[in-house]
Amino acid sequence: MEALLLSMKLAGCVAAILLLIGMPVAYWLAYSNWRGKFLLESVVALPLVLPPTVLGFYALVAMGPRGPLGKLWIALFGHGLAFTFGGLILASVLYSFPFAVQPLIASFEGVDRKLLDASAVLGAGSLRTFWRVILPLSLPGLITAVVLSFAHTLGEFGVVLMVGGNLAGVTRTVSIDIYDHVQSLEYSEANRMALVLLVIAFAVLSVVYAVNRRVWTPWAAK
Amino acid sequence: MDAVGGEVNGAMLAARIRKERHRADASSFALDVSIEVSPGITILFGASGAGKSTLLDCVAGLAAPEEGRILAAGEVLFDSARGIHVPAPKRRIAYVFQTLALFPHLSVEENVAYGLIHLREEEKRERVGAILEAFRIEKLRKQKPGEISGGERQRVALARSLVTEPRTLLLDEPLTGLDTELKAAIVDDLRAWNAAKGIPILYVTHNREEVNALGERVIALDNGRVASAGAPMEVLDAPRRKRLAQAAGFENLLSATVLDLREADGVMRVRLGESACEIEVPLGYAAAGSRVQVAVRAGDILLATERPHGLSARNVLEGSIISLEQRGTMVVARVDSGVTFVAHITPGAVRSLELMAGVHVWLVLKTHSCHLVD
């Protein structure tokens, strides 16, 4: 149970952080005319194709006491970043980045450009246009981004193992807990946890598809 | 005429704009106009592709001209020489798009209040209430744009633009798809509103009927240039500019009869001379049955020795070569296809196609290579 709560906490933090970072990044990727944009798009999509262990490995090296991030963290807070909850959040944010950013890009790009022009000629600057037009019309994408980054973080294994290790109450997330149970041949324990994850994953994906199929919409669609 | 360079009085909109536009088909297009719009409705008339929307985008600040100067109500909005480019949100130029671009997630009331940014709540309510009443849409306050009719949406778009008390109103074919009666009712309300405000309104259309019905003044745009300006009747029946066309290098000047107008496609079909030859030309200021002059440059005509197919060019005419005459590095071909065309081709083309007098050929003319000369 402790592991499940820890996973939930981790996924919640990561989803919130990703929403905040993801919005400006997605906005820039959706609307910038810079020709080298594809490079950043590739970087954003990297975690989709890299094995989690590769990402976890580099995150671990960077966070270690000799890594740049680790050094900075020690200077700031007096302790290292690897094998802590903070380190886990950081690595998970990297790992789930595309799951938050890509739905946001897609929904920002889906907003009719004429609406943005209309907003501009009505005197709205780009910030006002973002809050009053782009964001409300991208609500399904926003929900998808939060839900997917939450779900994806909940189920991660490789990155957590590399960066967090397996410290009960600190970095032992539910997927690692399941692995532990299986290793100790406690199959009924493992099954209970696995079932919970399965149900959560199904519920979460149902929300995403319902939102995108407009089964539920925040405004009257025509 | 060039008020843009000197002083402009009152509420007038004045713009001198040069803008290159590169199309996907690699044919470039230059907008090069100087216009003045006084208070009241001025129609900007021209076929699609004449540069009407580009002109409006430049005035609104959604596009930047390469060169020029734009003034509205005495304030400089754009001046390439002085490096002035006021961004769109600060121009106070209202712009109603063809698609209207109402915010689908906001109610009619919220749409209309959108541009009132720095006002106190009660003042906002007052202004919104007054304009909703002026455009007869107060009952729709709480509705979303998706729930109201086309005519009502057009009224909402007008109200949303005008509530901000703009210096100028730009309308890009806002009333397309409405029947004449509804259109007239909306325009009446617009006129009534503007009787008090007296701002210049630039109304874009490619529909001849609207020109007659609405405009006090008309500016006719053709291929990026002002073709004529003045009262609707003067502009629409502009004096023939035959000699001008010849001077500009149109070797083919053919009289034709208009068969039908296809406004949606921006074209019309004409029959050349007394022949059975029919071609498609850009929509012009003409009615079915009227006589027009069509000018085509000899260099814009393609010759083929077999019937071409799979072309984007809309006019393929059958004929036979009357004569070939070498002039320097160019061959002048005269082709009979009911009427006589002059085409310029290269000596290499003559050799490889084995052209000679009497050979059967097909002439290919792009619609936009056929210029109407009034």
Image (spheres, coloured by chain):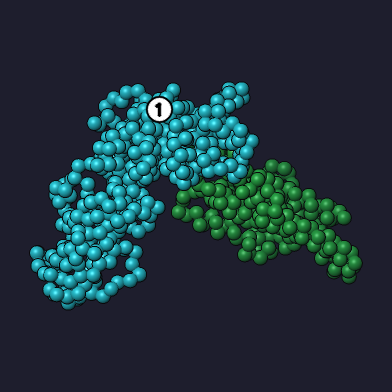
Chain colours: A green, B cyan
| Residue B348 percent coordinates (x, y) | 17, 72
- Which residue is nearer to you in this view: B293 or B44? B293
Report whether B254 appears left or right of B146.
left
| Residue B372 percent coordinates (x, y) | 24, 51
Q: Residue at x 22, y 46 (%)?
A: B374
Q: Residue at x 60, y 60 (%)?
A: A46
- Which residue is nearer to you in this view: A4 or A162? A4
Q: Residue at x 55, y 48 (%)?
A: A111
Assess disc 1: are there few (<14), some (14-19) or many (≥20) residues with their C-alpha within 10 Å of its C-alpha.
many
- Which residue is nearer to you in this view: A116 or B87? A116
| Residue B282 percent coordinates (x, y) | 30, 53
Badge 1 is on which residue?
A: B199
Q: Quadrant of residue A187?
A: bottom right
Q: Residue at x 37, y 57 (%)?
A: B24
Residue B227 visible to an observer of this rendering: yes
Report whether B277 appears left or right of B200.
left
Up-down relation of residue B361 to residue A162 (above or below): below
Up-down relation of residue B368 to residue B209 (above or below): below
Report whether A173 appears left or right of A76.
right
**Which chain does the numbered disc 1 sit on?**
B
Q: Quadrant of residue A196?
A: bottom right
Report whether B163 appears left or right of A186.
left
Q: Amino acid at mark 1?
A: Ile
- Which residue is nearer to you in this view: A115 or A29? A115
Residue A72 visible to an observer of this rendering: no
- SS state under label 1: loop
